[in-house]
Image (spheres, helix red, strand yellow):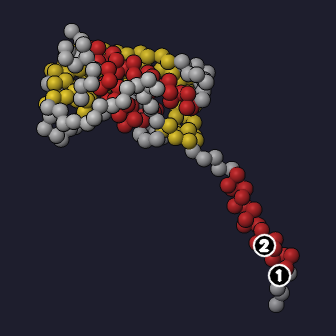
Amino acid sequence: MNHPTPRRSARLLLLPALLGLLAGCGTEPSRFYTLAPPAEAPAPAPPRMPERAIGLEPVEIPDYLRRPEMVLRGQGSRLEVLEYDRWGGTLESLITRSLIRELETASGGRTVLQLPQRRDVEMVNTVEVVIERFEAAQDGPALLDARWRIYQDRDRPLRFGRTVAEEPVETPGEPGAVADALSRAVTRLARDIAAALPDGSGGGV
């Protein structure tokens, strides 16, 4: 019976380690991003149980954005999916939470709650938002294109609007800079909606 020599045994032991090292070298770690408030945003007010509030339905986004990876707009109709640059949650939930935060600020501190809401709180207005575009060009600005609707008492349509917000990207194509620019676009969306709310909500008429 033949036994492996010490040199051959060393080679057999080194082979799996080498293969593992090569496999590790080919794997790039994922990077995760969120939608952050602007640096100058005021600190949030202490939480309280409101008697009346503004209700926000979950934001709707296009099918091409329903994925964890960040998407950039390429030449023409081409979309570039960044495999290792991902959102830190579903994009729908990130936009919805960011819009709630920015709406509360833009409406003068009014309470905004995500629907459906189980608490016994009266919704003086309900807001629906449908986003048609939410991405940045590979070599250009970030763009948010959204249609929104404000309801009175959650049933009667009160106002309709559209926000097209273009924000410069400090370093075009860089995912962190893209996330920052899209965050600013959400702030502009919130200001448009708040301005259209009836008196007592956002200063609208």
Outermost residue on the top side: it is 205
The image quarter in which residue 52 lies: top left
Which residue is at 56% across, 32% downward?
Answer: 175
Q: Is residue 147 visible?
A: no
Residue 40 at x, y = what percent? 44, 23
Q: Which residue is mark 2?
A: 12
Residue 180 at x, y = what percent? 50, 27
Above or below 136: residue 19:
below
The image quarter in which residue 160 lies: top left
Which residue is at 28% across, 35% downward?
Answer: 46
Sequence order check: which comes first, mark 1 or mark 2?
1
Residue 132 at x, y = what percent? 40, 23
Q: Amino acid at mark 2?
A: Leu
Above or below 20: residue 31:
above
Q: For the N terminus, give its image quadrant.
A: bottom right
Q: Amino acid at mark 1?
A: Pro
For residue 40, side relative to residue 150 (left or right): right
Outermost residue on the bottom side: it is 1
For residue 187, side relative to residue 12 (left or right): left
Residue 152 at x, y = what percent? 16, 21
> How many numbered marks are there?
2
For residue 190, side relative to residue 6 (left or right): left
Residues tagged 1 and 2 counted as in contact (Cβ below 8 A):
yes
Badge 2 density bin: few <14, some 14–19, many ≥20, Cα 10 Å: few
Viewer-proximal residue, 23 or 179? Answer: 179
What is the number of the mark on residue 194? Answer: none
Which residue is at 85% across, 79% downward?
Answer: 6
What is the number of the mark on residue 4? Answer: 1
Badge 1 density bin: few <14, some 14–19, many ≥20, Cα 10 Å: few
